[in-house]
Amino acid sequence: MGGIFTKLSLLDKLTPPSYNLDLINSILRLIRSTAYQSQIDKFSLFVLAVYDSSSVIEGNGIKLTDIFTTTLISDYNLDEANIVEINNKGELIESKKFGRKRILFYDEGFEISTFNKEVKFFIIDGNSLHIFFEGNYVKAIPNIFNQNDWRGQHHRISIQEVESVLERYRNSFPKDYKPSWYWQNKKDRILKKEPEVLLGMFFYQFLDRIISDAKIDGECFNSNTDDKLDVRAVHYETGDLYIFEVKWIGESETGTKYLDEKAHERANEGIEQLKIYIDHENDCKVGVLVLYDGRPNDEKINWLDTEKWDSKIYDPPFRLYMETTSASVAATKIIRTKKREKNN
């Protein structure tokens, strides 16, 4: 918390530091409140926008007017329940149920905070708190509970258990959000723009939430660019570096396509990028390619020169095929197919 307070205060030089400290404490109290915790498992995410009357009077802040709220709702596919007003004393200005609609908190969080500079924009996802201000991702408090709580540190996992970490991610990757947060056109399997930023940030948030013994570095996402989209974890005790290079294949709404042979080339480029990182990072323990596969068919990648790969490269690479149907729908199709085969 101290690091987040310091970073927010350095970015927001117009607001007295005591205001920012009170504000963060207020939001923590809200997350820990019975009102929030009683519903935490009933929704995926809600947005918290902050209004502090004293800041507004001084010209450093914004009140959530009807016009501003309406614009926010229409532009980012929210409903009124996604927006919760709170003052810096931790008092809810207007009590309402928490929202169920999910936004792209890494992508749209940048955008909202960039074009609404007066707003300290907070997003709460489960027990993690994400903070944006003036186009900067101020980072997060990944878990606000104590070590022994069932959502606390003791229920997290070590970065050293790379295989378990990746399988846990595969099993928890969301597939059934409606509307989908990564498909622009689910039927035609068209991903939204800048898939690496979108999916890379989601992977970063996952690690930041579940890893117990390493610092997860997502600073590359502050530039909101795909020039550098590796997620790094540094083990607290050993100093070992774990690098996760994020790539995607398939087609995006901008017209970028990595299909057929280009998909295989793109995947192998990820391995080459890992080789460069490993060569330049003496502390690198493991380099992992995290490949999001949005192609029409779930097909294996033709990996090249695997015998020449550095021993630090995680083999086989982690490929996550992005489903377009829920597990229940997929199961129904399988049963119907088996019935037809039996009847024939």
Image (cartoon, grey):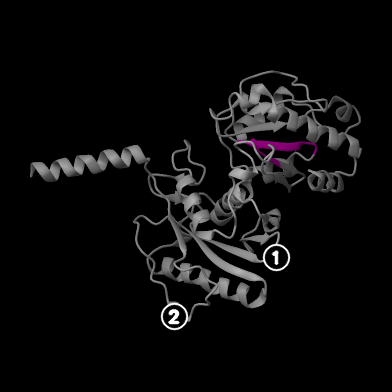
Number of the label disc, if any, that sits on residue 307: 2
Location of the C terminus by quadrant is: top left
Query: Is 124 covered by the magenta stretch?
Result: yes
Closest to the observer, 33 or 120 = 33
Image position, residue 285 (x, y; %): 61, 69
The residue under label 1 is 239
Query: Is 168 covered by the magenta stretch?
Result: no
Going from N to C along the chain, the mark reached first, 1 or 2, is: 1
Seen in the picture, residue 30 relative to 327 is either above or below; the reply is above
Instruction: Give amino acid for label 2.
Output: Glu
Q: Which residues are magenta?
A: 118-130
Would you say residue 50 is visible in this rendering? no
Quadrant for residue 176, please give it: top left
Q: Residue at x 20, y 40 (%)?
A: 336
Instruction: Give amino acid for label 1.
Output: Gly
Image position, residue 240 (x, y; %): 66, 66
